[in-house]
Amino acid sequence: MIEINGTDHDRTPRPGQCLRTYLREEGFFGVKKGCDAGDCGACTVHVDGKPVHSCVYPAFRADGHRVTTIEGLGTPDALHPVQQDFLDAQGFQCGFCTAGMIMTSAALSADQREDLPRALKGNLCRCTGYRAVADAISGTCGVTDRGCGVGSSLGAPAGPQVVTGSARFTFDLDVPGLLHLKVLRSPHAHARIVAVDTSAALAVPGVEAVLTHKDAPDRLFSTAQHENEAEDPYDTRVLDEVVRFVGQRVAAVVATSEAAAEEGCRRLIVEYEVLPFVVDPVLAMAPGAPVIHPDKGMEEGIVRAESNVVGELHATLGDPEAGFAAADAVHSATFRTARVQHASLETHGALGWLDDDGRLVLRSSTQTPFLTRRAVARLYDLPQDRVRVVAGRVGGGFGGKQEMLVEDLVALAVLRTGRPVKWEYTRSEQFSGATTRHPFEVTVKAGASSAGELTALQLTVLVNTGAYGNHGPSVMHHGCHETVAVYKCGNIRTDAVTVYTNTVPAGAFRGYGLGQVTFAVEQVLDELARMIGMDPVTFRELNVVRDGDDLTAPGDHVEDLGIASYGLDQCLDHIRLAGAESDAAPEGWLVGEGMAIAMIAAGPPGGHFADASLKALGDGRYELSVGTAEFGNGSTTVFAQIVADELATTPDKVVIRQSDTDVVGHDTGAFASTGVVVAGRAVLRAARSLRTGGDGHGFFDGTPRSVAFNAQWFRVAIDPDTGELRILRSVHSADAGTVMNPAQLRGQIEGGVAQAIGATLSEHVDIADTGEVTTTTFRQYHLPTFADVPRTEVHFADTTDAIGPLGAKSMSESPFNPVAPALGNAIRDAIGVRMTDLPYTADRIWQALQGS
Ligand code: FES
């Protein structure tokens, strides 16, 4: 007998069952799965008042004990004080970690509250950067009255549900008769499947179906989702006869339990013809290298399949040679970025079933419900109106869920069995079978006059897209665009290639290539400024674009892009004034300062559509239907604020239905920093339509596009004996146009900075020479914990954009981009060595110090 939230539960746990799955099976969906390894704390509950990670706590041990989940901590009408504190501080974004954070925090002693870095070491948050969590625990109120509109720090509409554990994420749904899907993944980096013996798997009690490439459509698609489908090569099949990376799907087993499905996978006998493979992108382009997609070419969107080159850009602006000849100083260096993972706490996954009308319904953790519907319908020859895709609350995305990684196979299983099917990635699969940030190698050569004029720039870029080209070419184009377009330099040469290798595919990730190229450009410019004896802020001020300037980069003609408001000068002012105070460095440590800037356009050049409809409910409330999903980006909060302002009501009178292909017209999705600026403008139009007696419908096609600016500054201290780095001060300035919700925007910036600090200092997905991903747990991956993230001082430029709704600009991705180069510049300042390869771990910094 286990007492859960005051009620006895007498179901006996299965042998080996953990408390997490037991509690969820009893209906306590506030208990989340983040890692199932005791690393992230999303599953934290109390046993006899003490916090435990329920994923590693055997359920039988709770027999005779008192278990409290988030649902039992307080009630919506009588919140526990810690729940109220998290609500008041907006101590969350996606909210997936929040129940666990609250359960841990609610059990802290007064002494533990004095040492939060230690007390919270078992609870990870990927979204917030922990400042908002710290504020919540200290009782600092960050949100304003729930009746305020644009410009106020309104709390998220879903806040009460998030802090009580009643917010419904993808799998927080009881589906009767559910089947479970598990996948056998390839042990080989490159192989042809000769035969699959399914008989032993089918004999496992509970196994309902085994799916191999012979059961799947022989149809190519891209897992990447864009409005403009030509952006990505069509090189992927649901189940392919050829596997091209260790971890690729080989076959799926569908069974009445996860255990039976896993056992079925173990019993599959697969005969492979092992093929030559290549994991190094330079070797992949060399003559004689294994060709990874020999059966495809230009028709599928691959520019040189025979050389494993999926996309390339070779273009010149002005006369770079003359520019270098005119320079008084020229500097060149090559930089390499690491393969990092989104690590959203909610893993990829989907539930699927046939509704009463026989329509295929997919409930998915996705940033792109409409594009996913389009892709699934096409794969299975279904009219789009016979497919419904809906997202619950999404537990973090960061671009990783702009990808169809599960829905295609869940759809196949539902169509084959006629039964509801669930597929939820494990944390290990998230590392080896999802996507990562594209690793880049970037060589930058730059020249400047002694007066500080940037006379020439040259980029040579190599992008490793892995075994499939989803997002590969467009990440390359984007990475090579705003990074140089932010400078007025008229002489630029770009040579870039995106290359296949037999490794886990890369994909969309916050910044979309800009972070990688900015990392190199901003460090070479820093070195150039040193060479001519100019401080780095002045050097930027002399060379950045100004209001009214055209935005150009080699090879890209983006007529729909421009500066519709300009605040980069203010960002640089904030950075110039940053410096004075910081924590003192420990005695004997080396101290340095560094800064970097970044520019980003909202939305992709191929178009980005948003649709919104608004109606009065007759009781003073309004119902807003909008296509975008909410995954912690906060766009839902801003939508409510926009409607409230336009209709002279309060945001709590706005009921929002979203991310459901049945409730609103086509919407491209929540990615490319478009949530507020594109969907928000559709919402604004819908509200204005209703206000003036129209039909309450709003649409925006995402053009023209405007740019936002960011600048980051750090002061760091480095222990010369160990290489340990401490951030003494972090200052970020953002030009986001009208600040729609200051608390939320600040949180988004802090979260982006924290993610980038992780990518710069500790995170790294390791790939063995065999192509196998060897980083398969959070413990190995070193996601930043509470103790690793400094407070960042956030400033906003005072601008109003001519394009975005009510003057707002995009922000969600861009705070990430200047962080790594600013840290690189600060390290260079401290130790006198320019470090070129990420991550900047303590051992690498120590090695650099020995070299110096
Ligand atoms: Fe913490 Fe998203 S709010 S993981």
Image: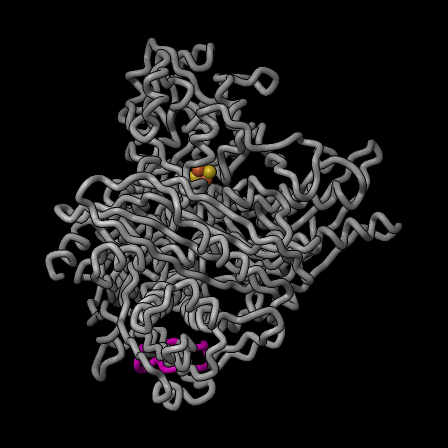
- Where 388 sits versus 507, above or below? above
Q: Over which residues does the magenta segment extend?
A: 298-310
Asked if the stretch drawn in magenta spans residue 119, the answer is no
Q: Nearer the viewer, residue 126 or 37?
A: 126
- Where 411 sits versus 473, above or below? above
User: Where does the image place residue 584, in percent across and percent down from the top left?
Assistant: 29, 39
User: Where does the image place residue 123, in percent across and percent down from the top left?
Assistant: 35, 32
Q: Where on the image, by quarter, is ligand 1? A: top left
Could you tell me which quadrant the C terminus lies in? bottom left
Q: Is residue 530 left or right of residue 610?
A: left
Q: Nearer the viewer, residue 478 or 451?
A: 451
Asked if the stretch drawn in magenta spans residue 299, the answer is yes
Residue in the image at 89% along x and 50% along y: 693
User: Where does the image place residue 595, in percent across and percent down from the top left?
Assistant: 38, 58
> Which residue occupies the extreme right position in the image?
693
- Where 510 sits versus 468, above or below? above
User: Where does the image place residue 730, in percent across and percent down from the top left?
Assistant: 39, 47
Q: Is residue 143 left or right of residue 18?
A: right
User: Would you identify the image quadrant in which residue 536 lies?
Assistant: bottom left
